[in-house]
Amino acid sequence: MSKDSPSLFGALFENAPANRPVPVLVPLPTPTPYSYAVPDGMAVEPGSIVQVPLGPRQVIGVVWDGGDDEGVDPRKLRPITRVFDCPPLGREMRDFVDWVAAYTLSPPGLVARMALRAPAAFDAEPMVEGLRFVGGEPERLTPARTRVMATAADGAAWTRGGLANAAGVSVSVVDGLIAQGIFETVFLPPPPIVARPDPAFTTPRLEGPQRAAAEELLGAVEAGGFSVSLIDGVTGSGKTEVYFEAIAETLRRGKQVLILLPEIALTASFLERFQSRFGAKPAEWHSDLAPRMREKVWRQAVTGEVRVVAGARSALFLPFEDLGLIIVDEEHDPAYKQEDRVFYNARDMAVVRGRIADFPVVLVSATPSVESRVNGQSGRYSTIHMPTRYGEAALPDLHLIDMRRHAPQRGGFLSPVLLRAVGKTVERGQQALLFLNRRGYAPLTLCRVCGHRFQCPQCSSWLVEHRFRHQLQCHHCGHSERTPEACPECGTLDHLVACGPGVERIAEEVEQHFPEARTIVLSSDLMGGVKRLRLELEAIEKGEADIVIGTQLVAKGHNFPLMTLVGIVDADLGLANGDPRAAERTFQMLSQVTGRAGRTGLKSHGLLQTYQPQHPVMQAIVSGDAGAFYEREIVEREKAVLPPFGRLASIIVSAETRQDAETHARGMRNAAPQVPGIAVLGPAEAPLALVRGRHRFRLLVHGKRSSDMQGFLRAMLAGGPKERGSVHVQLDIDPQSFL
């Protein structure tokens, strides 16, 4: 079909007879589906993926449920132009889209758009040319030809390359037999992108605690129906092997499995572990996947050829044929929160998808979110505890370094205590990890003469120096500029000073102290992207590095066999803001990072540099008493009626001018209905008051757990001023970020 075919096809149907109207949900921010006519001879049903005219364009849509189309004259409607040769979205998937749209107050078309991310996959994949043995004798029978004929003698169909590989010959040998009529041409269905995982490929070796946890989890899977299980296990306790058993049982039952991971592009080790257990890798789904591969994964998930998908949060909207289990690994991770177009938390929506489709959901973490912990305590979730590491491995010994007593050398950021520990670790042939969750070289650059600070021209944030790239960059809008030699304000040369450390600066300090050590810096914005990061992670696992300096990338499930020392450069960093989850996030991050050490049984240590050694988070980490930390945090949340004991919704009003943003925000505040148990705070300038050239004001809606937050917000939006000009209103139910 040519590029112009869709529009020509649509033109042919403009005057075609139509027999009935149907609602079609198009991937646009419209509140309801549009009505279209079904031409005579065309068969559609709810969930059918179709092509429809919208203005001068042809767009993809989904035939939807309900609507008031029965009283519409189909002769007055534009007709559907095409039905794709693709299985329809099932009722459960459509219900899920409607639920997410209603909960997040998002247009249902934008939610449906997330389920239609691979338009080229809606058409069936073309058949693959193959061949089949038909008999006969070639003019000259060689040993190679004999092997090919013997391999294909059972009459099975082969591809040229597949047959040549199976027979151990070159493709030219097969081509010679084809030319002599020994084989006939046949057409085969496209091959699966990954082999089917085999639940019996290996026999897992589970120890006592693992075996008990696996049996408890298998009970939930075997019982069938909806349930949520929380695996709460320390780092290195074997949580992955335990939920692999739930996956195996689900596969035996003929169901598909979805595994959500916060950083799928960086988890090559997970894919290898899966392959070792099941004999094949799962299909991947994430933003770095090539478009052609995304199309294949989408198509084969909806047809059922792909049995297991491991993916980032967007994989939750893949329309599986028969999904029977969702695993949410590292369920506490903030990466599961999407903050663009449709604001949703993939962990929470995974639970909703399981409830709608009536299958089990498994949440996994060494440091569960407070919400999941409370749900476990209340009985909403069943909790599976794994308090010890696998095998003989012990948790690292953790100690605080009081930076008031053990200050770094002038111009440095690493305490002498930490430097001595790094030196001893490297001398033993083991690895040390230095963690700082701050990219670049320095978070601020200023002039020592006039005090000029380099700020983003489009955001209310400082420019971060990236010395490896000789750039100053904004991490909010992406603005970058060349690092100047002179101050742009006073013109003084060589008086620009970097303030504070980033991972690049820590690497520079490490190289001064340990010039012979092999050092690797891991950060999401380094040159080379995901491919380089994967290669460097593999190098660390193989022992090809002595000292690793990294951001939060190193905290997520990696297994470094020789890692015996973890040093936290600035343990206080995450506590220095007004985020109500600051203590929880800091505890989770530091616990996960220190958990990288000693996973293979080697004696290990964790050292945390802090100026607040008496802070409850620091004390909870070094004491190993996670229960006490959670108990304290839960009590504080309950007192303040914060999630999960209360509800929050964030409203960000942005505009090209500060006055427009503030005026609109105040108008919304004045339109808020008076409802007992719900309060509106603000408006006030957001902590990031300017982003990408847009001024931002923030309102925070706070209510009791039983509050009808969505109903309140709908009334507030309906009674408030309408969006005009550059004004834009952004809603976030259950916000994770308070910037």
Image (tube, rainbow, N blue to C red):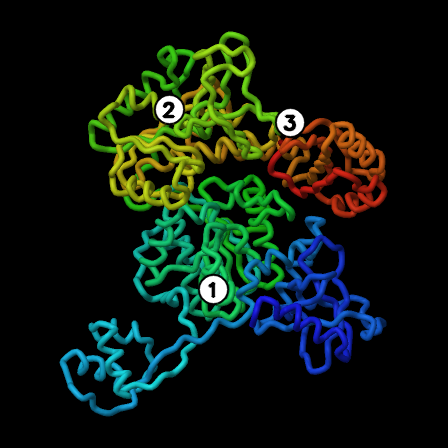
The answer to whether the residues at label 2 and label 3 have Cβ atoms under 8 Å apart is: no
Residue type at mark 1: give it: Lys
The answer to whether the residues at label 1 and label 3 have Cβ atoms under 8 Å apart is: no
Mark 2, Cα crowd under 10 Å, few <14 / some 14-19 / many 20+, is many
Residue type at mark 3: give it: Pro
- According to the image, label 1 marks what residue? 296
The answer to whether the residues at label 1 and label 2 have Cβ atoms under 8 Å apart is: no
Query: Residue farthest to the top?
Result: 449
- According to the image, label 2 marks what residue? 506
82 left or right, relative to 292: right
Mark 3, Cα crowd under 10 Å, few <14 / some 14-19 / many 20+, is some
**Secondary structure state at the residue bearing disc 1:** helix
547 and 398: which is toward the camera: 547
Pick whichever of labels 1 and 2 is earlier in the sequence: 1
Residue 236, given in percent of the width and then of the height, sits at 36, 43
Residue type at mark 2: give it: Ile
Distance between mark 1 and mark 2 Cα atoms: 43 Å
Query: Residue farthest to the bottom?
Result: 136
Residue 609, given in percent of the width and then of the height, sits at 41, 21
Residue depicted at x 67% and y 79%: 43
Q: Is residue 198 above or below residue 562?
A: below
Residue depicted at x 70% and y 75%: 12
**Secondary structure state at the residue bearing disc 3:** strand
139 left or right, relative to 102: left
- According to the image, label 3 marks what residue? 687
> Is label 1 or label 3 in front?
1
Pick whichever of labels 2 and 3 is earlier in the sequence: 2
Residue 435: mark in rendering: none
Residue 199, given in percent of the width and then of the height, sits at 37, 65
In the picture, the quarter occupied by the C terminus is top right
**Secondary structure state at the residue bearing disc 2:** helix
